[in-house]
Image (cartoon, rainbow, N blue to C red):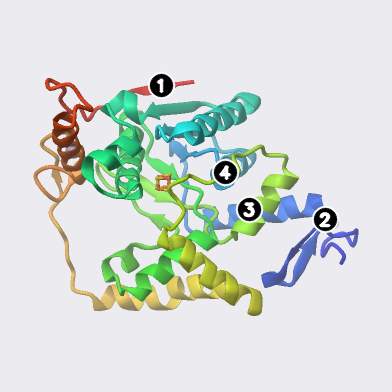
Amino acid sequence: MKCSVCGQRAQVEVRRRNQAFCAEHYRDWFVGEVRRNLRRHRMIRPGDRVLAAVSGGKDSLVLWDTLTRLGYEVTGFHINLGIGDYSRRALETTRAFAAERGLELVVVDVRESFGLTIPQLAWATGRAACSGCGLTKRYLMNRVAQDEGFNVVATGHNLDDEAATLLGNVSHWQTDALVRQGPMLEGREGLARRVKPLYSLTEREVAAYAFLAGIKYQHEECPHAAGAKSLLYKEVLGRMETRMPGTKQVFLEQYLKKIKPVLKSGLPETEVELKRCERCGQITTGRVCAHCKLWERAYTRAKKRGLLPEDASFDPRPVVKRV
Ligand code: SF4
Ligand SMILES: [Zn+2]
Ligand SMILES: [Zn+2]
């Protein structure tokens, strides 16, 4: 197999595109794809301040690497979830990546900020770890962006993630989620713009880039990931992709191009009134936001079970550290 650009021996095959590349031209192709996504959706505009959510895994570190290569000044944001050794290694990996490249990193430790780790939050609320974790991460990303003066939050979602989310939403006909799904969600007052510059690149392509660019990332998965429905959707799509290369791409891109606009125009306008949460001041639809409600509930139960002292009270202000 030969590189489609220079004719040298190819190292990576991109089957869905019927192309193959040597190491150098693969990196160029990959960064070029990210640039194309950024431009096509006007994800980052002049004067924007960008915060990239970095977990320490391949997707987020590749995101940070490519945005930096493209000349954007991007600050990393890592959340220490307190999930034992997994979280300790995630922080170490992220720190090392930032230090090697002289990049700015901000860190929030969930336990230091809110008094409980994610597993403790799950135990106290009786809900699956991923449900409280996802809510807390979304809250922190938006809140820290606001507090620290960033108007854009970039995340490392790849094509496999996006196609799996789409399959999940379609399987249950979640129309609200379907119309929101996309590579960019425009911001508004109190809400940062959310962008996914890797959305058109597969997990395998991201991993190949990480390897060829010498990025040291955390390989281990979060121990709570096992059994997640998203893995099942990925497996189903993966089997389809093996038989029919390009399936994931067509599934997502054609949805965004052909179906989403029709769906959006066919649904009744549901302009919900946005308010400020009485507890934390963040944008919400109710009196108190979902994040504050969840943590207040966790505090009540954690106190009853002796995990927190009787006089402990939930403070929604995160402790932000620059490292
Ligand atoms: S798998 Fe669940 S608990 Fe682990 S990081 Fe992801 S959302 Fe959080
Ligand atoms: Zn080449
Ligand atoms: Zn709140």
Some atom of ligand 2 lies within 8 Å of the CB belonging to the residue at label 2: yes
Residue 22: assigned label: 2
As shown in the figure, which amino acid type bears the numbered disc 4?
A: Glu
Some atom of ligand 1 lies within 8 Å of the CB belonging to the residue at label 4: no
Relative to 163, 110 lies left or right = left
Element class at badge 1: strand
First along the sequence among labels 1 and 4: 4
Query: Mark 3 sits on what residue?
Result: 206
As shown in the figure, which amino acid type bears the numbered disc 3?
A: Val
User: How far is mark 4 from mark 3, CA to CA?
Assistant: 16 Å
Instruction: Verify CB contact (< 8 Å) between mark 4 and mark 3.
Output: no
* Location of residue 262 in the rendering, given as x and y in whole percent from the top left corner: 33, 78
Instruction: Verify CB contact (< 8 Å) between mark 2 and mark 1.
Output: no
Quarter assignment of residue 151: top left
Which residue corresponds to the image point at 49% horizontal and 20% vertical from the top-left? Answer: 323
First along the sequence among labels 4 and 3: 3
As shown in the figure, which amino acid type bears the numbered disc 1?
A: Lys
Using a 10 Å C-alpha cutoff, classify the residue at mark 4 as few (fewer than 14 neighbours), some (14 to 19) or many (20 or more).
Answer: few
Q: Is residue 190 above or below residue 173?
A: above
Query: Mark 4 sits on what residue?
Result: 220
Residue 321: assigned label: 1
Relative to 29, 274 lies left or right = left
Using a 10 Å C-alpha cutoff, classify the residue at mark 2 as few (fewer than 14 neighbours), some (14 to 19) or many (20 or more).
Answer: many
User: How far is mark 1 from mark 4, CA to CA?
Assistant: 25 Å
* Location of residue 206 in the rendering, given as x and y in whole percent from the top left corner: 63, 53
User: How far is mark 2 from mark 3, CA to CA?
Assistant: 15 Å
First along the sequence among labels 1 and 3: 3
First along the sequence among labels 2 and 3: 2
Residue 31 in view here = no
User: How far is mark 2 from mark 1, CA to CA?
Assistant: 41 Å
Which residue corresponds to the image point at 57% horizontal and 27% vertical from the top-left? Answer: 103
Q: Is residue 200 above or below residue 309?
A: below
